[in-house]
Image (cartoon, rainbow, N blue to C red):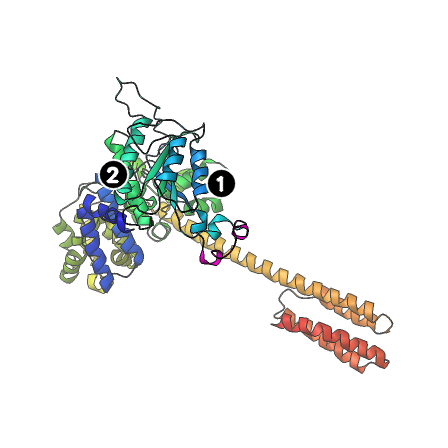
Amino acid sequence: MADLRHLRGSWTEVHPEAHSATRSWWDDYRRGRYVKDREAASFARHFRVRAMTAAGEISTTSVPGQSRELVLKNISWGKSIGHAFRLIEYLSRDGAFNVTDPNDPNMINGVQAHLRVKEEWGLLPDAQNLKPEFQDKPSSYWLQVPEKDRLQSRQFLHSVVSLPPSLNLPDRSPLSSSQPDAAAAGFALSSAARSVFTDAGHDFLMFPHRDKGHLHFHFIIQAKSRTTGRQLHLQRSQTQALRQEFAQSLRRVGIDVIATERRDRVPELTQSPIDKAIHQTIQRGDASWFQRQQALQEGKYQLGTFARKAPGWHASFGLEYEKRVAFDPLQKGTAGPSPQSPAQRGSAARRLAERLGLAARSQPQEPVAAPLSSFLKDLPPEGADHLAKKAIGLYRAPEKALRSFAAMYQENPKMAVWALNRRPLAFGDLKAGWEAPDLTRRELNPAPAWFEAVKEALPAFNTLSATEKQIAQVQAAEATEQRQNNLATRAAERLQLRHNAASAHLLGLAERVREEWGRDPRAASYAAQIEARAIGLPDDTPDLNRMVAAARAALRHEAEQASRTPDANRAIQARLAQDRPNDKDRER
């Protein structure tokens, strides 16, 4: 909407640094430097969430009923004066919460709202707002058509702004109290709406309610501007900007609300979802191995591939990667993710090892990272140069990123190089304006002495024992076997259904032979042969439809060779002609 165009620039004004970093990266992406759309959206979201986290405008709670999110919904568009009057009468009923303010022209009672809409808004009567196909028709004709189908122009918008139920604002606070109340919320929302709609020529009315158990405000907004004559059009981005405008106005009067997009709402991650899901499943006591495998797939940010192919890396660095994927609000500035306690780290293999009574070693405290030069000294010169310039320079904490990469490379070199090129976020927080390293295993070519140096500097970079690794591999093998068994079972069920359908068809054909050729002495033998085919049909028949067609061809041949009267032959041929299209359909 042209009149609300200033709402589009609100993001760049509030977060210019995040916008510029995201925009420059997006321009590079569009030039073909990056491959995946998912990476583009992920990186743009990374900067947006960081900026909103620093400003305290992002929700970090996952407890039901404790959200701080402000809700804005566009309920419906109205096209008639009668619809507007009925809506005003409903919103100003006895159940409405009365916080009318004589100094606020938008917070008035129902009678005043009727008069204002009728006299000042200039809504078109139905006879002047008809679609072209109804303009030359009498009123007795178009009155039978619903309003939304016979009327042309939208005349008002009905929207609702809902405050979080956890606020529990009183109607009016005592004068001695500094606690915000519903009157303050109404004043803040009305002020924000005036700055957006009234200044653009769109008048509005506001009605506060408590009938749903929490405070919410209904808005009736004039669709046609009084100053420019333009229609109101709220796109999705403008609706989100308007929601942020309302939230900012409420925060000015002391009401703690936020307005983040759904994709930016991040639960605070304190434990790996994989570990949590499998732990809850195992606690039931009757969980089978298959149910445990299902629990592994129910984690919201599950790392199935990494956990299966690099269990040692997943045990030491998996939770940190999950936090980065979820954009944990604890990441602020350039400090990176918060330090983890040993109880917060682990893997599904460790949980299973404890459940089976195996002696799993406790994870030692994470040692202090050695300088970057100590990691690269034993790497071949070319490989060290490639890794230092193209990859490690992308990260905010290069020593920690290199340690994570070395752990995965020793366990699964192919996956480590793939993750470095395609999922660099797996090894650490990335700097602004990063580019994909595009390295190959031949360029790196690390010598065994390099891994020895890494082990010497960081002896605990892999905390899984041989027993735990074996358990993780057994889990993966069992999951694969279970999937193959399920596929084989479904294939057998489909084959059995085809077998049953063909048998039923042959039995029906035998029944018709007995009914129609009952006088023929050979009809009983034909029917018996068909039933024998139906009962003795093998399960591995390659083409059941072809067998049915062959049975019909044999019957047709026998009918032609048999000596019958002309009338009987004509009846048989007519019956076979009726069945012939069905055979063609089954063959297709």
- As drawn, is 572 to the left or to the right of 170? right
User: Badge 2 local density, few (<14 within 10 Å), some, or many (20+)?
Assistant: some
Q: Which residue is mark 1?
A: 287
- x and y, in percent, of residue 501 in the image: 66, 63
**Kind of residue at badge 2:** Leu
Mark pair 2, 1: CA separation = 34 Å
Answer with the quarter of the image where residue 109 lies.
top left
- x and y, in percent, of residue 297 in the image: 42, 47
User: Badge 1 local density, few (<14 within 10 Å), some, or many (20+)?
Assistant: some
**Kind of residue at badge 1:** Ala
- x and y, in percent, of residue 147 in the image: 48, 48
Magenta span = 131-144
Residue 92 drawn above or below residue 497: above
Decide which of 555, 108 is in the foreground and name it.
108
Q: Quadrant of the C terminus?
A: bottom right
Secondary structure at badge 1 equals loop
